[in-house]
Amino acid sequence: MAVSLQMHRRLLYTILGLFAALVAASAAISASDDERGEITEYQGEKLGSIGSFREYSIRGVQVADPRTDRLVIDGPVTVPAACAHQELQSMPHTAKLVAIHCAEGSSVKAFWEGISLVDLLARVAPLAAANTVIFHAVDG
């Protein structure tokens, strides 16, 4: 049972990390290309282009509204949280190079910047019994 619970916690941490990355990415996407430009290299590694990234979602790319949308972390946690975009932007961010491998076979190297999952979990303190994550995206 301990191995199963440990695997569920890792899944929880991974999914929360991905959501944090999406929230952080929404801020970068909202800036115009003229303001930021596209990052083409990071730490000596050539990055994939946003223009060549395949998008397969059913409803197209969804955009979070930073004025109203919240990152909600609740369920089996000690301190549930509902963080506004501005609050998330004020939290410490980390950055790294990631390789994204899609199920249909394509891959891309990308620059990832977002809130450390460790920091998010420290805010909510998951209970030891936490073993399942339910993720709701902007489009449901």
Image: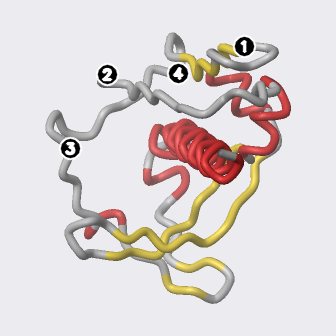
> To which residue does mark 2 refer?
140
Measure the alpha-carbon separation of dots 1 and 4.
Answer: 20 Å
Q: Position of residue 137 (x, y in %)?
A: 39, 28
Query: How many neighbours does mark 1 have within 10 angstroms: few (below 14), some (14-19), or many (20 or more)?
Result: some
Q: Disc 2 versus disc 1: distance between alpha carbons?
A: 20 Å
- CA separation, marks 3 and 2? 12 Å
Quadrant showing the N terminus? top right
Label 4 amino acid? Pro
Residue carrying label 3: 57
Q: Work out whether mark 1 precedes mark 3 in sequence or the reverse, and give the earlier one.
A: 3
Name the residue: 53% across, 50% down.
Answer: 35
What secondary structure is found at the residue carrying circle 4? loop
* Helix, strand or loop at mark 3: loop
Mark 2: secondary structure: loop
Q: Residue beneath label 4, please?
A: 66
- Marks 1 and 3: CB-CB under 8 Å? no
Expressed as whole percent of the image width and height from the top left, the position of residue 75 reads 62, 16
Of 51 and 136, nearer the camera is 136
The disc labelled 3 sits on which kind of residue?
A: Ser
Give whichever of 124, 69 is nearer the camera.
124
- Which tag is nearer the camera, tag 1 or tag 4? 1
First in sequence: mark 3 or mark 2? 3
- Amino acid of disc 2: Gly
Q: Residue furthest bottom?
A: 44
- Colour logic: secondary structure
Q: Give the vertical position of 82 relative to 35 (above or below).
A: above
User: Distance between the Cα atoms at labels 1 and 3?
Assistant: 30 Å
Q: CA distance from mark 3 to mark 4?
A: 21 Å
Mark nearest the camera among 2 and 4 is: 2
| Image coords of residue 52 (percent x, y) | 26, 70
